[in-house]
Image (cartoon, grey):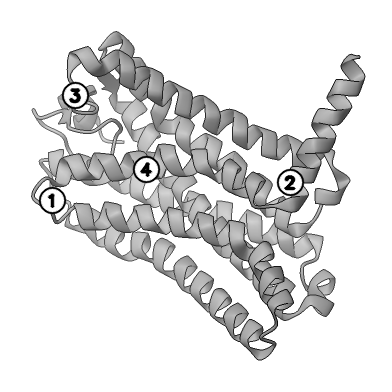
Amino acid sequence: MRGENQSSVSEFLLLGLPIWPEQQAVFFALFLGMYLITVLGNLLIILLIRLDSCLHTPMYFFLSHLAFTDVSFSSVTIPKMLMNMQTEHLSISYPGCISQMYFYILFGCVDNLLLAVMAYDRYVAICHPLYYTTIMKEDLCVLLVAGSWILSCGSALLHTLLLTQVSFCADNIIPHFFCSLPILLRLSCSNTSLNELVIFTAGAAVVIFPLTGILVSYGRIGASILKVPSTKGICKALSTCGSHLSVVSLFYGTIMALYFSSSSSNSNDNDMIASLMYTVVTPMLNPFIYSLRNRDMKLALEILFRNNIVFTK
């Protein structure tokens, strides 16, 4: 990290959401409640998968990592936003801002890659059910998850190292509720063409390749279902893929909203709304989607509550 970065800008100011002062308390309570639901809901999923031996399968192994990633992803930005809303202490140090950006990119990439891994798991389960246990061995599952984390760490580290090479001059005001990489590059007084090129190539690859894998997997799943167009087969496929497909639609829907918001006239406000959907709403809804649409999860939850009631009597 170059010394000129530290001497020119030692901290940034996060302006946060465009909320009137009299509305701060209401929105603080709303976002605090959503964050607590996100944390508790995803931790409950992890607990159920760990305690119930029936859930010790590749699908739920990937789901437990997705739940952990969702908790971490929300925790990167929301606590700081809530603290700023409550105390009106808007500053964040330069190292703190760079760290927040790094972990935001890291967990966002892991989320993306895990959804692609889970799509592949569903493809094998439906299109090659007889070979499922042979293909989806424990070693392969661990390798897929480890690969997702390693690729995400590499992508986040690349963006972070390149950002530490640019200079920040007088302007240190970030019109957002977290340290967003595109906004930080706009504040820089250096040439950021290399950073933008890396965002366009590496960033697009992290989104496009997993999305392509998901589309190919579900395309083959659809073709497999059409070969045996029975009501029972369709219902079985929907029960197997419904939860994951709902999460994928929600996840990439917010990414598309975030992308198209950058070209509108009120791009900054739209960007913040899309970012809230991406970092708050989606991780909060994932536990409900997997719990309410998944028979195994509902059964594990019933057993957990039943055992607790019996234990407390």
> In the rendering, at what x and y percent does residue 192 appear?
17, 51
Residue 58 lies, in percent from the top left, at 75, 58
Question: Mark 1 highlights which residue?
Answer: 191
Give x and y (percent) for residue 120: 63, 70
Asked if residue 23 can be seen in this view, the reply is yes
User: Disc 4 marks which amino acid?
Assistant: Met
* Outermost residue to the front: 231
The answer to whether 157 is drawn above or below residue 208 in the figure is: above
Q: Which mark is residue 7?
A: 3
Relative to 223, does residue 284 appear above or below in the rendering?
Answer: above
Label 3 environment density (alpha carbons within 10 Å; few <14, some 14–19, many ≥20): few
**Comes first in the chain, label 4 or label 2:** 4
What residue does disc 2 label?
Answer: 297
Q: In the rendered structure, which disc, 1 or 3, sits on the residue that comes first in sequence?
A: 3
Q: Which residue is mark 4?
A: 277
Q: Nearer the viewer, residue 190 or 219?
A: 219
